[in-house]
Amino acid sequence: MWATERLHVKSNGDDEVLDLTRKLQDAVDRHHLQHGQVLVFVPGSTAGGGHSHVRASLLGPSVTLPVEDAKLVLGTWQQVVLIDFDVRPREREVVLQLSGEKS
């Protein structure tokens, strides 16, 4: 099973931290993903040489999470967050790719 979704989240910029964990688990539930993985990718780099781009490049634009028994595999206090290093408010697109076995 393969599926791609796009989330759109509004950010105020200036290092705002947005928790995406619930939205990711909702996608796992919606696609009935039992075992597999979710790739989370944010297009755009807030790039071009400014300090925002350098900080964003240190974290990277993506993370891949395992899914086991229809749940994201995360530690007790772990979350998946988007940190917007841009200096202004904007809407961010987050691309999810889900792959694996359906329940």
Image: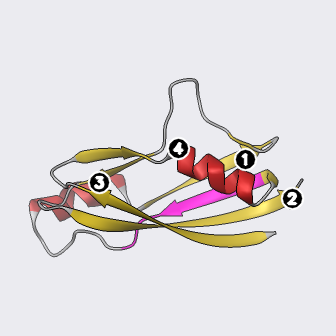
Q: Look at discs 2 and 3 and give the one toward the viewer.
A: 2
Q: Which residue does the numbered mark 1 point to in the structure image?
A: 67
User: Cα distance, mark 4 to mark 3?
Assistant: 21 Å
Q: Which residue does the numbered mark 2 point to in the structure image?
A: 102
Q: Look at discs 3 and 1 and give the one toward the viewer.
A: 1
Dominant SS type (magenta): strand
Q: Look at discs 1 and 4 and give the one toward the viewer.
A: 4
Mark with earlier residue (3, 1): 3
User: Cα distance, mark 4 to mark 2?
Assistant: 20 Å
Residue type at mark 1: give it. Val
Pointer 4 with pointer 3, Cβ within 8 A: no
The residue sitting at 55% across, 44% down in the picture is 22
Give the crowd class for mark 2: few <14, some 14-19, many >=20 residues within 10 Å. Answer: some
Q: Which residue does the numbered mark 4 point to in the structure image?
A: 21
Residue type at mark 3: give it. Leu
Above or below, comparing residue 13 to residue 78 in the picture? below
Mark with earlier residue (2, 1): 1
Q: What element carries label 2?
A: strand
The residue sitting at 70% across, 53% down in the picture is 28
Q: Residue furthest right?
A: 103
Residue type at mark 4: give it. Thr
Q: Look at discs 4 and 3 and give the one toward the viewer.
A: 4
How many numbered marks, from 0 up?
4
User: Cα distance, mark 2 to mark 3?
Assistant: 34 Å
Q: Is residue 93 magenta-colored? A: no
Q: Position of residue 46 (x, y in %)?
A: 22, 68
Between 58 and 8, the residue placed more toward the observer is 8
User: Cα distance, mark 2 to mark 1?
Assistant: 11 Å
